[in-house]
Structures are given as structure tokens and as C-alpha cells.
Amino acid sequence: MTTKTRVVVVGGGLIGTWTALFLIKRGLKVTLIEKGVVGAQSSGTNFGNLRLQGRHPGQYPLSLRSQAIWEEIEELIGDRCEFEKTGHLYIAVNDAEQEKLEQHARVAESHGLVIERVGRDELHRRWPWLGETPQAATYSARDATANPRLVSVAVARAAQRLGVEVIENTRVTEVSRNGSGFAVKTEIGRVLECDAVVNSAGAWALEIAETFGETAPMFAAGPPQFVTEPLPYRVTPSIQAVDGSAIFRQIPRGNVIFAGYPRTAADHVLNRAPVPPVKTLNGMRSLMKIAPFLKSAQVIRVWSGIEGYLPDMLPVIGESEVAPGLYHAFGFCGHGFQVGPGVAAVLADLIVDGRTDTPIGIFSINRFKNAVQVSDKLAREFDMPASSNSRAG
Ligand SMILES: Cc1cc2nc3c(=O)[nH]c(=O)nc-3n(C[C@H](O)[C@H](O)[C@H](O)COP(=O)(O)OP(=O)(O)OC[C@H]3O[C@@H](n4cnc5c(N)ncnc54)[C@H](O)[C@@H]3O)c2cc1C
């Protein structure tokens, strides 16, 4: 069966669902195709941080555009998805880390964020359950959290109500040129002819990009995560140790959710993201140092996710140079939940207006034609060389 649509969005994660919503709102006929069910991969398994502190300087315009969309989520889709402005407390345990926080704070402030410096005494007065190790912190009240298990599904539902065709449990097997547009084939033999394709296929996105001769050194990984039994509610902000060893938040139902580095390699072919038990034990040790009241908390579930990472810790966003009308948005390196709606708004700008006011040049897939600087964090965690332009293991 062959049908016509204006845009095919491949992948029903956060990026794909928000993009479909913004495109239909701007009057385009859209079909979204998901190989499994909407929001079941990274977009549904992530930690739920909508963190503004500590981002790459070049990502702030996109990030702030995105946060403004998160702040309107209920008006946009009719569902709050547990979005809360919890604030984000970024913790240092020594002078070197405190200096790092200061550098992050200056960058964030240059983009208009309000960052509070919190010294040891005030830290322990405002959050008395903190252990002795934190010596200073920065606090950003605009940072937020939302429930990842709810968002993509709620956005897809809102898009569907406006007329987006959402096809689940169907893999896109081929994207090819068809005149000035594209033919998108699915595993059940359906062909969709369209003017534009959005490649928001997450850790699987290279399958489409490489059809057109474009590639990136992407590999699949995810931070180990766990959740504790419900405990009396006292941790209101989202907390992050600046070395990444502990990132945690408590939901009002009482459970404490944890994420932490080092990350774990995932397998996007076998569809597995195993967490070695030692990572949960180490995570619990890091957590206890910051929040000793959690020392006898029971961990009730452990998981991670299959996320595309690129060596410079920046995603690929923008129109393909070799196949105009194909738009890539993948490789979000563990921070795509926060930027997702902003990325979708940018894709809608590009597809409808042919341009965007949000700077996205640094996210071009073409940067991998030359060797890129590997992020220090990834180099340590995955034993990578200092520069890379080939696919990592
Ligand atoms: C454990 C973990 C914790 C994280 N925590 C945070 C956090 O706190 N804050 C934050 O900002 N970010 C976080 N992230 C990152 C964030 O979850 C991701 O960056 C974001 O969800 C990526 O969304 P996506 O739509 O690109 O990818 P995905 O959610 O992976 O969606 C891509 C979809 O494409 C589908 N697909 C692939 N190939 C095909 C095909 N051929 N045909 C049809 N469908 C296809 C897949 O099935 C998938 O559903 C975390 C990630 C992980 C793994």
C-alpha cells in the first residue's frame, strides 16, 4: 500500500512526538512511525531532569527555548506529566569542584539564568538532611523535573488528537529518494511518499543517515539508575554531585530516584541496557555520602536505557547536506529530555520556514568530517582517545 503524507517522523521518542505535534500545529500532514511503542526507549526510561545548570555553553539558547516549552506543557498538551519546578542543587565537595561550579555558574548567568551561590552553613541550614561532605553548591530555581514515563505518550496523544497518524510496532526499513521527496518503507510493506523525513530514531538513527552516506561516531550507552522504596518526603530539589557520581531526586510519593556515572555501554541491536550490580553498590555509596539518611534505603528496581552518545557530548541536529528534506535529530548524550521540545520546535522551524532563529550550527553532522575533541568525561568512562571521527565501540 502506498500513501502520501507531507512529513514522516521516524521514531516515537520525545524528539519525534514533540516534532509531530509542532508540525501538525503548523498545518502539515504528519505520519509518525515507531518500531516499538511510543516512549519506550530512552525517552521513557530516563531520570527526568530538566537541568539548566552545567550545560555546554553553545547549548543554552536551545535549552532555554526548550525550558520555556516545558513551562507551558499543560497548556500545550493538556497534561502536566508531573512537571515541577523543583530547582537544581549542584554540589561541590572540594575547592576544585567549587571552582568548576563557579565556571558553570558564570556561563549560565551570561545566558540570563539566576544562579545562587550557597556556602556550607547555608547549605546545611536549608537542606539539613545533607551529609558533611558537601562544602558548597549552586542552586538554580528554574530547573525542573517531569515524569519521563508519561511525556512522550501524552505528547503523541495530543498530536493524534490534532490529526497526526501514529503507527506503532512497525519498523521503518528503508528511506530512499523519490523525485524531490522521499519514499519511506515499513517492515509490513507500506510505502509513504512524503516531502520531508525527520530522523529521530535515537540510538538507531545511523541506519537512516548512512543510507545517504552520512555518518557519526555514535555509540549506545546510558547511566545506571535505581529507585528506592518510598521514604518520608524531604528532598525537594533535584541534586547533582558535580563529578556526576550521584544525581538524585525524591518524588512526592517518597521514592528516591538515582542516576550516576560512570555510564554503562548498551546494545541497540539486542535492545539491552544491562546494569552491572557493582554500579548499584557504588551508586548507593556515593549517595550515602551526600544524603546519609538513605544508608539503609532498599533499592527496589535497577535500570538504564539505550541512548546515542557522540564523542563531544553534543547531539546531531539539522538538515542533511546530502539529502535536502531529511532532518536529523539524534545522539542526545544523556541530556535530550531537557532539550527535546526545543529541538522539535527548531525542526518545525526548519521544515516550515526553511530557517530557525535558534543557533544550531555546532550540532551539524558535518563536524565529524574532521576529528572532534572527545569529552573528558567520556574519555575516562569509555577509555576513548582524545579525538575521534570514527565510530566508537
Ligand atoms: C538512563 C537514562 C537517563 C537519562 N536521564 C536524562 C535526564 O535526566 N535529563 C535529560 O535531559 N536527558 C536524560 N537522558 C537522555 C534522554 O532520555 C534522551 O536524550 C532522549 O530521550 C532522546 O530522545 P529520542 O527521541 O532522541 O530517543 P528515543 O527515546 O530512543 O526514541 C527514538 C525512537 O526511535 C525508534 N526507532 C528507532 N529506529 C526506528 C525505525 N527504524 N523505525 C521506527 N522507529 C524506530 C525507537 O524504538 C525509539 O522509540 C537519559 C537517558 C538515559 C538512557
Image: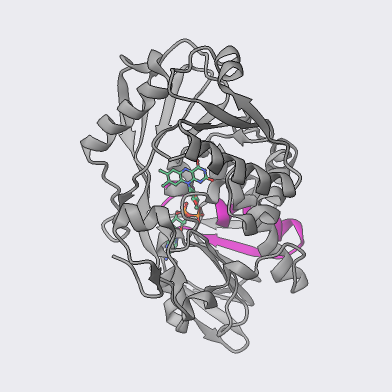
Give the farthest residue toward the left.
Answer: 277
| Residue 65 image position (x, y, % from top left) | 72, 51
Residue 277, above or below 171: above
Indicate whether residue 235 is drawn in magenta. no
Q: Nearer the viewer, residue 98 or 6?
A: 98
Judge by depth and name the residue closer to the eye, 38 or 278.
278
Which residue is at the far bottom? Answer: 179
Is 189 or 150 nearer to us in this picture? 150
Spot occupied by residue 300 in the image (x, y as percentages of width and height)? 31, 24
Q: Is residue 123 left or right of residue 250?
A: right
Q: Does residue 354 appear left or right of residue 307 in this picture?
A: right
Q: Which residues are magenta?
A: 14-40
Can residue 21 be seen here?
Answer: no
Q: Residue at x 61, y 41 (%)?
A: 102
Query: Where residue 208 sits in the image (x, y, percent)?
Result: 45, 73
The structure residue drawn at horizontal position 32% and vertical position 52%, both measured from the top left corner, is 381
Query: Which picture quadrant has residue 285?
Result: top left
User: In front here: 348 or 36?
Assistant: 348
Vertically, is 54 above or below 367? above
- In the image, taking residue 209 as reference, residue 227 lies left or right, namely left
- The chosen color scheme is one colour
Residue 327, placed above or below residue 147: below
Looking at the rendered image, the quarter that the C terminus falls into is bottom left
Quick check: can you spot residue 177? yes
Residue 95 spot, x, y in % from top left: 49, 35
